[in-house]
Image (cartoon, grey):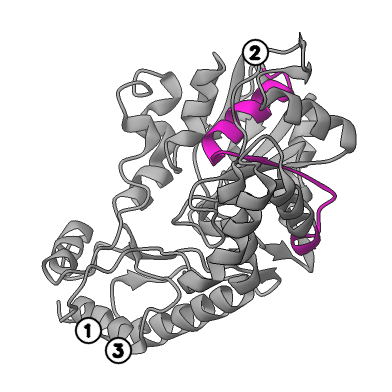
Amino acid sequence: MAEHPIYVTSPLLPALEEYLPYLEKIWATKTLTNGGPMHIELERALCSYLGVDYISLFTNGTVALITALQALEISGEVITTSYSFVATAHSLLWNGLTPVFVDIDPDSFNLDPSKIEAAITPRTTAIMPVHCYGGPCDVDAIQAIADKHDLKVIYDAAHAFGVSRKGDTILKHGDLSILSFHATKVFNTFEGGAIICPDAKTKTKIDRLKNFGFVNEISVVDFGINGKMSEINAAFGLLQLKHIDQAIAQRRQIDDHYRHMLQGVKGLHCPAQSEDVTQNHSYFPILVRDDFPASRDEVYERLKQNNIFARRYFYPLISAFQMYSHLESSAVSNLAVANKIANQVLCLPIYPGLSTSTVEEIAAIIKGF
């Protein structure tokens, strides 16, 4: 059995000596934060890699979400999903907004466009979908609804680094898209995040908001926050970017091997992948359905006993947490699909360096039921 814990995600960690030249440059410039050379270089490199025109780096994805909502001056109610990490909804509360939860599509696990219009009220000003596990939302349907009702669209694209559909990045959809560069993400700066901006004017506003609202040394014009990425984190990002294609290729191989090993197991479902989507394979979710010989939690515990740490991701739903459970839209009857998936889902370990033998060990434990 595995000798060390196996986590769901892990960065591809370059050798220590690769970091040293970056650190030496930082010491030489004597700039540790506030938009230094590394920060500027990483923004340019990410724009090129992701195929976007403007990007604003942040200290983490949560602060980026909070600032995106502030930048668009969102008010009242925001339609979103309860099948996500809690930061999605927390960013709304930080802005004094009311989340309105809508159910998910049973195949993509993303916000179900057919349920959105019924949730719109006179107080609705925006939609915040999530590209769950990096799989693109139905962006065309969502945008059509937003245009019809004059709503903003902010995509929580925390999982969607480098994902494209029909050859085009999904990060240009909506008014803003937000990335997370947390250590568990496909591309990471250990801690970090970003907002994809549609134009220079929007980027200027967002850059001002993440720096307390300063426009110059003596003038503050916005109620901003300290959301700046440090030079150290930017340097790590530049180094990670050199290895990102290799990391995604390894993830793809692991994904393929899991599918091969678990194919045909009664009661287990591996969600299909769209042929017109270029995935980053950030997660490997399976559904442990009712006709499997054991429950999802029994599979989770058996893996844990063997020092393999999968995640029930996302369980419980955001709507089940105390600060959200009182909302009318949190009712189980309103989120039937999301509740069902949350009780069946299990994300298996996937990260660069995960060996074929370990994937086979994990599959053997699951099939052992």
- Secondary structure at badge 1 equals helix
Q: The residue under label 1 is which amino acid type?
A: Ala
Which is nearer the N-term, disc 3 or disc 2? 2
Between marks 3 and 2, how big is the CA–CA gap? Answer: 54 Å
Quadrant hosting residue 325: top left
- Between 114 and 342, the residue placed more toward the observer is 342
- Between 281 and 215, the residue placed more toward the observer is 215
Magenta-tinted stretch? 48-74
Foreground label between 3 and 2:
3
Label 1 belongs to which residue? Answer: 364
Please, which residue is most extreme toward the right here?
A: 200
Q: Are marks 3 and 2 in contact (CB under 8 Å)?
A: no
- Residue located at (37% from left, 27% from top): 331
Q: Where is residue 27 shown, x and y percent of the image? A: 60, 50
Q: Where is residue 17 shown, x and y percent of the image? A: 51, 72
Q: Which part of the image, by quadrant, shows the N terminus?
A: bottom left
- Secondary structure at badge 3 equals helix
Between marks 1 and 3, how big is the CA–CA gap? Answer: 10 Å
| Count of numbered badges drawn on the protein | 3
Foreground label between 1 and 2:
1
Q: The residue under label 3 is which amino acid type?
A: Ser
Q: The residue under label 2 is which amino acid type?
A: Arg
Mark number, residue 123:
2
Label 3 belongs to which residue? Answer: 357
- Residue located at (62% from left, 46% from top): 231
Q: Where is residue 238 shown, x and y percent of the image? A: 65, 61
- Secondary structure at badge 2 equals loop
11, above or below 235, in the image: below
